Image (spheres, rainbow, N blue to C red):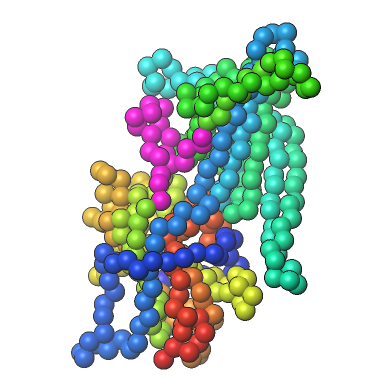
């Protein structure tokens, strides 16, 4: 059943393609005993847009004498995050104990945060025009912003940490989800991290206008999933899966399979996206959190990140073998009385949602996507 009945704008891009694949599980079909009318199907294929990601640049001076020009610093860049209306992303610096049983030397990664949102519009010639809006906030280590076109860059220096701590001395950058910016230690929701041990080969930093090397930088990828101190135990999330959508006269169904189990703190949901005649997203039909497939659609999979509410949820390997969404027209207030309620809807998405994101608004991360048949979008379907 849909969680929302009001008109909503989509917070993600809308360009996608679809290839025909076979779905692993299906909705009940029409028969002479139980007619469903005409149904229009479309494939849902792996997408991966806006998967949370980023990089960490580690910088250090080559000698104490060059610290004034290229002192120790970390540059944390994050993308693809969902906005958190009631919680914050908290950035920490730490090391791990010798036995990899605990975190040590934990400090908040206090620095200067730059938030950049890239907006795009179509001009009178039909060309895409982009513009950037940026904001800089000093002396912070936590934030709640996010969105498909928003990049967060946190620059942490020895000075921003109070002068006594070198940020380069911490080999781990950890991003947790906390109730507020007053957390004193990393909580249990740990979806993003980077390790100095994963850095690329060091690159020289030169004194401006000279060949003199004054510092070294190296870059590590930000991992997304469920952090563990031991690298063998960490869960790195990947976008996989396939499925099928079907739209009938008075219902929409998604059936999909082979998804990875969500990281702790996340779940899968379904959406239909409505576009205007200029291909701008103007409405979102929220299909709700995924459920087990027919005939167990009353079993929600929202807690599949931390439990096994149905046998389709597997812990080894961490996966969801089959899942579904189904919404009937009579459960959506704005559709009541509409003869062709799905007119204008162009895309179907399965998204990876933060449990602490905005309710009823599609998260940036699109796991599966598909193109709604043209006859449905145009309103010419039977």
Q: Position of residue 113 (x, y in %)?
A: 70, 37
Q: Is residue 231 magenta?
A: yes
Asked if residue 263 shows in the view, the reply is yes
Toward which corner of the image does residue 47 lie, by quadrant?
bottom left
Quick one: which residue is furthest to the left in this view? 33
Toward which corner of the image does residue 78 lie, by quadrant?
top right
Q: Position of residue 267 (x, y in %)?
A: 42, 54
- Residue at point 35%, 50% (across, down): 260
Which residue range is magenta in the image? 221-239
- 170 over 283 or under it: above or below: above
- Residue at point 66%, 38% (across, down): 153
Q: Position of residue 61 (x, y in %)?
A: 66, 15
Quarter in which the N terminus is drawn? bottom left
Quarter in which the C terminus is drawn? bottom left
Quick one: which residue is furthest to the front in this view? 211
- 190 over 126 or under it: above or below: above
Choose between 234 and 104: the one closer to the eye.
234
Choose between 319 and 176: the one closer to the eye.
319
Q: Is residue 181 left or right of residue 36?
A: right
- Residue at point 64%, 75% (across, down): 278
Q: Position of residue 35 (x, y in %)?
A: 27, 89
- Residue at point 69%, 51% (across, down): 117
Quick one: which residue is furthest to the right in this view? 209
- 236 over 30 or under it: above or below: above
Choose between 380 and 193: the one closer to the eye.
380
Give the number of callouts: 0
- 134 over 363 or under it: above or below: above
Toward which corner of the image does residue 361 lie, by quadrant?
bottom right
Q: Is residue 186 magenta?
A: no
Asked if residue 324 shows in the view, the reply is no
């Amino acid at each position: 059943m849909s969680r929302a009945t009001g008109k909503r704008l989509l917070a993600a891009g809308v360009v996608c393609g679809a290839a025909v694949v076979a779905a692993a599980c299906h909705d009940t079909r029409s028969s002479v005993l139980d007619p469903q009318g005409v149904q229009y199907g479309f494939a849902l294929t792996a997408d991966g847009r806006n998967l949370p990601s980023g990089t960490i640049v580690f910088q250090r001076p080559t000698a104490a004498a060059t610290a004034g020009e290229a002192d120790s610093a970390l540059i944390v860049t994050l993308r693809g995050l969902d906005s958190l209306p009631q919680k914050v992303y908290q950035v920490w610096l730490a090391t791990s104990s010798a036995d990899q049983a605990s975190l040590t030397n934990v400090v908040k990664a206090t620095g200067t945060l730059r938030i950049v949102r890239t907006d795009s519009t179509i001009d009178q010639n039909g060309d895409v025009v982009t513009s950037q809006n940026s904001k800089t906030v000093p002396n912070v280590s936590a934030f709640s912003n996010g969105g498909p076109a928003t990049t967060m860059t946190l620059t942490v220096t020895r000075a921003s940490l109070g002068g006594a701590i070198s940020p380069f001395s911490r080999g781990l950058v950890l991003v947790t989800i906390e109730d507020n910016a007053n957390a004193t230690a990393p909580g249990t929701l740990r979806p993003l991290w980077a390790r100095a041990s994963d850095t690329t080969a060091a690159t020289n930093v030169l004194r401006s206008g000279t060949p003199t090397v004054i510092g070294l930088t190296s870059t590590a990828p930000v991992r997304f999933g469920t952090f563990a101190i031991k690298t063998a135990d960490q869960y790195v999330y990947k976008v996989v899966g396939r499925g099928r959508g079907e739209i009938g006269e008075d219902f929409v169904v998604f059936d999909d399979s082979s998804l990875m189990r969500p990281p702790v703190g996340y779940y899968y949901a379904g959406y239909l996206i409505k576009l205007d005649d200029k291909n701008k997203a103007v409405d979102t039909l929220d299909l709700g959190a995924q459920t087990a497939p027919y005939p167990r659609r009353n079993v929600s999979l929202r807690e599949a990140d931390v439990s096994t509410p149905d046998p389709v949820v597997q812990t080894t390997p961490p996966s969801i073998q089959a899942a579904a969404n189904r919404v009937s027209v009579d459960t959506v207030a704005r559709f009541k009385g509409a003869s062709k309620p799905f007119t204008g809807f162009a895309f179907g998405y399965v998204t990876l949602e933060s449990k602490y994101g905005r309710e009823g608004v599609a998260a940036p991360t699109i796991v599966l996507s598909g193109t709604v048949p043209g006859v449905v979008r145009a309103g010419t379907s039977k």
